[in-house]
């Protein structure tokens, strides 16, 4: 997909994600949902110092999913504090109405759910025109066939291994089937979209998702609830590399 050149609010040019993330092999993206929001900038600094290649931000509106989290103000604050790429996962109704705002806020990847889009192709193309990478998320109960016609119009597919919007869920192995199917399709078609996974990632599950093809692996409690961010990220990424 073609992307326009954008700059972050601080004025620094956006470094292509192919350089920042994709050259690392399987990369863990810590999710900020469980971090200490009373010391947000320090949490971002700690995660970057620990080796996080990017950060994952869960935006939930309390309507598309039951939980209500945060929005533009927090994304803007993280962007000011972060020098690594940001993936903004929009679990909201009518995301096409807010993608321009989140692009301006500094998202490097904008992820939208196929289940919530009236015009999936148009929304993905609009995201690309704004500058961020356009990723398409698919929930556990949604057939993979929903995303197949859209693979040429997105930069990545985020396979959810838990139901979006609910915390504390166990990893759903249906994600492995979807990742493996998408890996096979990408190889057969010669596609370039990235494969991502989100939900229930731990030292016990990360090897299986990496073996199935996941490249961007979102980890919440496995990193944020650990005593040592650097140790957690290093261990997870090593397990992923060994399995990939």
Image (cartoon, rainbow, N blue to C red):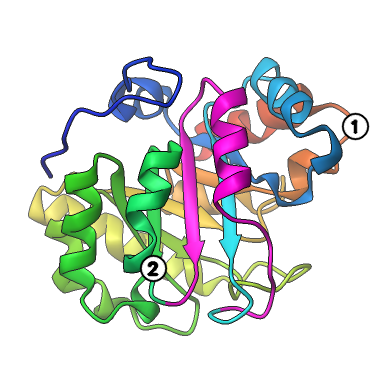
> Who is closer to the viewer here, 41 or 18?
41
Q: Mark 1 packing: few (<14 Cα in 10 Å), some, or many (20+)?
A: few
Mark identifier at residue 95: 2
Does any portion of residue 18 appear in the rendered image? Answer: yes
Identify the image quadrant of the C terminus. top left
Query: Is mark 2 in CB contact (under 8 Å) with mark 1?
Result: no
Percent position of residue 193, x then y = 24, 48
Residue drawn at x 32%, y 24% is 7
Badge count: 2
Residue drawn at x 75%, y 31% is 232
Residue 151 occupies quadrant: bottom left
Identify the element where label 2 is drawn.
helix
Does any portion of residue 36 appear in the rendered image? Answer: no
Residue 173 occupies quadrant: bottom right
Residue 148 occupies quadrant: bottom left
Mark identifier at residue 227: 1
Percent position of residue 27, x then y = 50, 33
Percent position of residue 233, x then y = 68, 30
Q: CA distance from mark 2 to mark 1?
A: 35 Å
Q: Which residues are magenta?
A: 65-93
Question: From the viewer's perspective, is 242 left or right of 118?
Answer: right
Residue mark closest to the camera, 2 vs 1 = 2
Q: Mark 2 packing: few (<14 Cα in 10 Å), some, or many (20+)?
A: some
Percent position of residue 57, x then y = 58, 48
Identify the image quadrant of the N terminus. top left
Q: Earlier in the sequence, mark 2 or mark 1?
A: 2
Identify the element where label 1 is drawn.
loop
* Magenta-colored stretch includes residue 230: no
Is residue 12 positioned above or below 186 on the image?
Answer: above
Residue drawn at x 35%, y 22% is 23
* Magenta-colored stretch includes residue 80: yes
Residue farthest right in this picture: 227
């Amino acid at each position: 997909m073609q992307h326009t050149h954008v700059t972050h609010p601080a004025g620094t040019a956006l470094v292509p994600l192919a350089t920042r993330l994709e050259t690392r092999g399987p990369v863990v993206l810590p999710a900020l949902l469980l971090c200490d929001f009373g010391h947000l900038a320090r949490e971002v600094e700690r995660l970057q110092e620990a080796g996080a290649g990017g950060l994952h931000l869960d935006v939930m509106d309390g309507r598309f999913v039951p939980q209500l989290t945060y929005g533009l103000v927090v994304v803007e604050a993280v962007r000011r504090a972060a020098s690594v790429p940001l993936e903004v996962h929009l679990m909201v109704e009518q995301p096409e109405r807010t993608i321009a705002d989140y692009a301006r806020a500094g998202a490097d990847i904008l992820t939208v759910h196929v289940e919530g889009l009236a015009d999936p192709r148009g929304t993905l193309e609009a995201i690309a025109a704004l500058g961020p990478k356009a990723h398409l998320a698919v929930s556990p109960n949604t057939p993979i066939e929903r995303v197949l016609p859209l693979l040429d119009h997105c930069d990545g597919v985020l396979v959810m291994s838990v139901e979006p919007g609910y915390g504390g869920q166990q990893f759903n192995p249906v994600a492995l089937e979807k990742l493996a199917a998408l890996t096979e399709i990408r190889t057969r078609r010669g596609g370039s979209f990235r494969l991502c996974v989100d939900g229930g990632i731990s030292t016990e599950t990360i090897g299986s998702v990496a073996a199935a093809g996941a490249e961007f692996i979102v980890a919440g409690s496995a990193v944020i609830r650990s005593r040592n961010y650097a140790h957690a990220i290093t261990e997870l990424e090593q397990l992923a590399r060994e399995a990939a």
